[in-house]
Each structure stands twice: as structure tokens, then as C-alpha cells.
Image (cartoon, coloured by chain):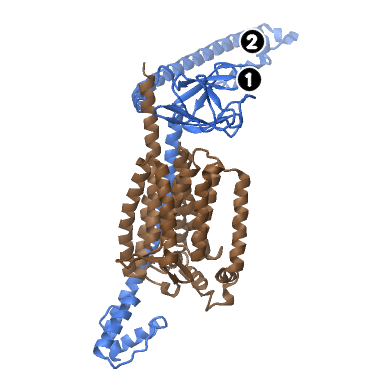
Chain colours: A brown, B blue
Amino acid sequence: MALTNFICGTGFVLLLTVSPERGERQMLYYFAGLILMMAMSLAVTHIHRLEMLSALAILAGLLLLALPLLFGEWVNGAKNWVSLPGFGIPFQPSELVKLCLILVLAQAFSRQPSLRQMFPALAFAVACLLLLMLQRDLGTALIYYLTTLIVFYAAGGSLPLVALGLMGGTGAAVFGYKMFPHVRLRVAMWRNPWSDPTGGGYQIIQALLAIGSGGLFGVGLGQGSPEKIPAYDNDFIFAVACEQLGQVFGILLLAVYAALLLRGAVLVLRARRSFGMLLACGVVACLGTQTLMIAAGVIKLIPLTGVTMPFLSYGGSSLLSCMGMIGILHGTDARERRAIETDFSSAGKRGEP
Amino acid sequence: MFLFRICDGRDYNTRKSDLQGVFSNLVDKLLPNYTVILSFHQYDDRIQKKEIEKTDGRRAGRNNMNEAWYRVCGMAFSVFSAIVAGLVAFLSLRQNQCEEKAFKRVREDLPSLGDVYVLRVVSVEGSRRISAGDRFSVPDEGTLGSARSCDIVIPYRGVHSKTAFFWVEKDGLHMIPLSREGFLTDGDRARPGDEAILREGAELQIGKIILRLITAEEGSFIPLSLRLKHKNEDRTKERKKEPEANLEKARRKEIKNLRGKRRAEQRNETRTDKGKAARAKADARRTTGSAACGKTDGRKNPDKASGTPSFFRIRSRDRSSNRRI
């Protein structure tokens, strides 16, 4: 929780310097996220009839993902936003459906089921991917795909099937490259952003210049020109952090992310039940792939994917889903501790002379 | 010029978004017909500073001072945040290590931690690797079979590579067959699709091997919390005994040292006595003149005359007289 709070606090400070209203709104989202975190933690700890919850999660997930296609608008080439009626607050359903996906996969893949028994969960994952591709939200689709593959592998799925999944993903990537022009543009700009410095390559060039101009210890909080980077408050907040607070801080921030993922990995290794292990594995896979994708995209290691930096970027949906995932980790830990105590207390009653 | 007078009294370090908003509102209210073409993205800070200096030099000086302090504070904050981030990452990794060590210590003290049940082999036919009495620890959840990837590996030819999936609950050990043949529990066959519940003492037959389910520490099982409490009490008792044990050790060491010193002194005394005797003999021989007859000279080879081995020759050097005895 300390690691999460540190990253959230850094996000608040940066957002307040670049845009005070957004910083204040992000604080409100944080408090909402705390409530969701507690709710998820309690749900994972106390709910034992997971089949029912999993079925509800599948229905809710598919419904939420269909909403933008029915009622959403095209924003920046993607149709993944929906406004809450009455409130007018926009939110991204694909962020919240991540929690549903992790729950469904963990429940379906636990206890060594056969492929037939895994089929509903796999079908749900494929349906989510298709809906996201229709929305043109390919970055989130990639996160969903990698999370499903990692959880399937961790559940003891056969290696040939995992290899088949990888090949399928590669094929889908090639298909996406051929079909979607903006994917081709992103790959071209990743290879050489200077070929179009005022058009497609402007964003990545400004980000690189910002990181470079920050130097080791940054230009100072509130200094620099972060507003010159398009989407500086959500996708490229990491570049803003490196500009203002320095590259050393950027590296240490990534180390904090790594420490957070390591804590999750420890839970995965110590889990005594496969359901808890797969829940924690799903959360670590989701957060890890998202962090890796955006951090590597900002520094031009891989093509940009248009996902947010967990806990750091401005965005209510993103922050809520990340806090929900932390709640799942807390719940998993509590569940495992309770399992140990229950086992020993019940065995003690049986074994006492 | 008029526009710059409006923003003159304001803090120069105001954020650009706010300044732009305030500016446009003021201009709209005061000068509705005045068209301001001002783009803050292209606005040059240096030009604005010069204009402020022209209008009021003192205010410009104060604004420059504010700007300088603001920059110093910003730089200081960036160094501070880097230190805090480093501390947070370091402390969390250290916390991980401490937890790992604590977990290992608990595991050393309680090797059966988490393993409530044990499967004990009752009878087995024609196996060199397993014999009656062998025990297999049952984890909280896992697979049972002859494959090495299983959680309980039973290396017996009649056992399928993945025979069953099991998990522990309050009412006992639940098992689901994964192979076609299934297994027998107390004589009842369980096939794929069935769920068998084994309680303590139940017999499990897979092929020609029969196993019995027992608790991990039969007859003397103590709940974990109580065991840890006892362990902690024992540890505190041992720590209290340590000072007394240390005193005793120190006393024994002292006695040993004293004994050693006495022995060394005694050895030196005997050597000096022997040396004196040898000298006396040598002197006696000199006075009688037996050394001239070619007999061995006690002085030249005193140790040979006395019959002392060569090892002690080197050792028995009298440092005070600086000659071999």
C-alpha cells in the first residue's frame, strides 16, 4: 500500500503543477479508488461461491464493453469512452472489465480443469479481445491478451497450447498492421519519428526532448514545458516526471513499480490455493504488462500503444481499476493467511489426545 | 504597454494556464473591442521580463527574485523526490528480504507447515522404490500421480501420471480423479466426475498400492499459533541462560589457561634442571681431561651426550646464557 500511495502521490504532485483542476479531480478519484479497493478486498476474502460471481463478471464485462460501441463517440481514433447518464462523467469501461477478466480467468483455471471446462473463460477472453478491436483500443487488447496467456501458462496449461496462443497473437498483430493505418503509422514513427517531426512523430519527439532536457535531476518541479507534449497528463506523464524531477527519479520510479510487482510475485509463490495464486498472477501480469508497455513506449523502446501509466496518469477509470487490482492482492493475501489458520485450528482439534 | 500594466502586479511565476485565463477575462471585461493576439505557447518569457523591467524596475527585480527562489525550490524538490523514491524502493526490497528470512525460519522450525495430512503407505507389491511405512506429505492443494510435475509423486508403475486432484477442506481431503481408472477410497471406486472426501484414517488404493490418510503429526499435534508461542518462549529462555553460560565458559577458559601456564613453567624448570646437570658433567669431564682422549665433548654435543632428541635440541635453548644447553 505504501508503494501504491507513493506513486499516486507523485501523480498528484505532477498533475497539480501541470493542471491544478485535474490534480484535484485525481484526488477525488483516489478516494473513490480506496473504496473500490476495500470492496474488492472484502469480496475476494469472503466470497466462496465463485462460480456465481464468475458468471456475473462475464455478463457484466461483455455488457460494459458493448456500451461504447452502442453509445460512445470516436475520440482520437478510438471509440472506448462512454459518458455516465445524468453525471456527464466520461469513463472507459475496458479499464473496469480488467477486474472481471482476472476474476473469471482465476476461477476457471484453478483446480486443474480440462480444456472443456476452461472453454467459457477462454471464450470470454476472446470476446473481450474482439470487442476491443472493434473499438480500436488495441493497447488495452494487447494487455488483455498477454494477461490471459500468462494466467493460462501459470495454471499449468499445456505448452503446445501456449505456443499456439503466442502464434495466434503474432498473427493478429500482423493482421492489425495490415488492416489499421494508425498501427502502420505508429510503427513507422517508432522506427523514425524524425521523418514527420510536426505530424505523427511530434509526440514522441517532444517526449524524448523533455526527458533529455530534464537531465539527471530535472529542471525543477513546475518548470519546463510539459504542455508541449500531447497527452502530457495521461499517456506521457512519465516524460513529464523525467523532465521535472530528473532521469534518476524516473529510474527510481520504475524501481518502485518493480518492487510493487515483486510483492505481488511473492504472493503468487506463497499462495497455497491455485485460485489465490492465479488471482495474484493475473494482477501482476496486468499491471506489469501495462507499466512495461507505456514506459517502453515513452522512451521509444517499443511502438506507442496508448495505455496509461498505472497510478500515475490522470484518469479516473485507470486509477479505479488499478486500485481495484491492489484490493484483489490484499484479499488474496488475507484469504491465504486465513486458510493457514483454519487448517491448523481444525487439524489441532482432530489431533489432540 | 497597458496590458503589461495589468499583469504587472501579479506574480511572474503564475502558471501559464491561469495567467492565460485571467488575461483573457480581464481583456474581455475592460477592453471589449481590443483584440489580443497572444499565444502563450509561443510567448517568450524573456520579452515579458524586459517589458516588466521597463515599466517598473523594482517590481521586476522582485519578480526575478521570486522566480529564482522558485527555481531553487523546484530543483531541491526534484533531488528530495529522487532520494525519497530511492528510499521507498530500497525499504520495500529490504522488507521483502526480511519476510523471506522470517518465512525460512518458520519453515525450519515447522517443516510440516501447511501440510496438515500425510499419506502413509500401508502395502505395496513389487516395488523397489517404495516400501510399507513410507510417508508422502500432502500440501494444501495439488495433483497426485507418478509424474514428476505432480505435487505428490508416487513412483509406482500402476499409478497414472496424473491420477487425482486434491485439496484440503475442514471436513477432510477432497479428491477428484483425473484418470479413467480413478481410485478406491475405503473400497468405493471414484471415477472421473466424482468427488471423494477422505477423512483421517481413510484408505486410498491406487492400483496395487494402498495408502492411509493420517494427520501430519499423529497424536501430538499442536495448533500452529501455540507451537509458535512455545517456540518463542523457549527462545527467550535460551537468551536468558546465555549470560550464565558465558560466565561459565569464561571460567573454564581461565582455568585452562592457568593449567597451561603451570605446565609450561614445569617444563621449563625440568629443562633448566637438565641443563644444569649436563653443564656439571661437562665441567667434570674438562677437569679430568677425558675430552682430550677423543671421547665426546659434552660442550660440543651436549644433547648427544645426554641422549636428548634433536627436536628438543632446538627447543631447549637458554636465552639468558645465549648458548645451547
Quarter of the picture holding the C terminus of chain A? top left
- Labelled pair 1, 2 in contact (Cβ < 8 Å): no
Q: Extreme bottom residue here?
A: B33
Mark 2: which amino acid?
Answer: Ala
Mark 1: which amino acid?
Answer: Ile
- Is A251 rendered above or below residue B99? below
Residue B214 in the figure: left or right of residue A319: right
Numbered disc 1: secondary structure: helix
Q: CA distance from mark 1 to mark 2?
A: 19 Å
A292 or A339, which is in the foreground?
A: A339
User: Which mark is in front, 1 or 2?
Assistant: 1
| Residue A248 in sight in this render | yes
A47 or B25, which is in the foreground?
A: A47
- Is B295 rendered above or below residue A301? above
Q: Which residue is mark 1?
A: B314
Residue B92 in the figure: left or right of residue B164: left
User: Residue at 34% across / 52% down in the picture?
Assistant: A36
Q: In x, y percent, where is residue A63?
A: 42, 58
User: Which image quadrant is residue B310 in?
Assistant: top right
Q: What numbered label is drawn on residue B282? A: 2
Q: In x, y percent, where is residue B7?
A: 28, 84
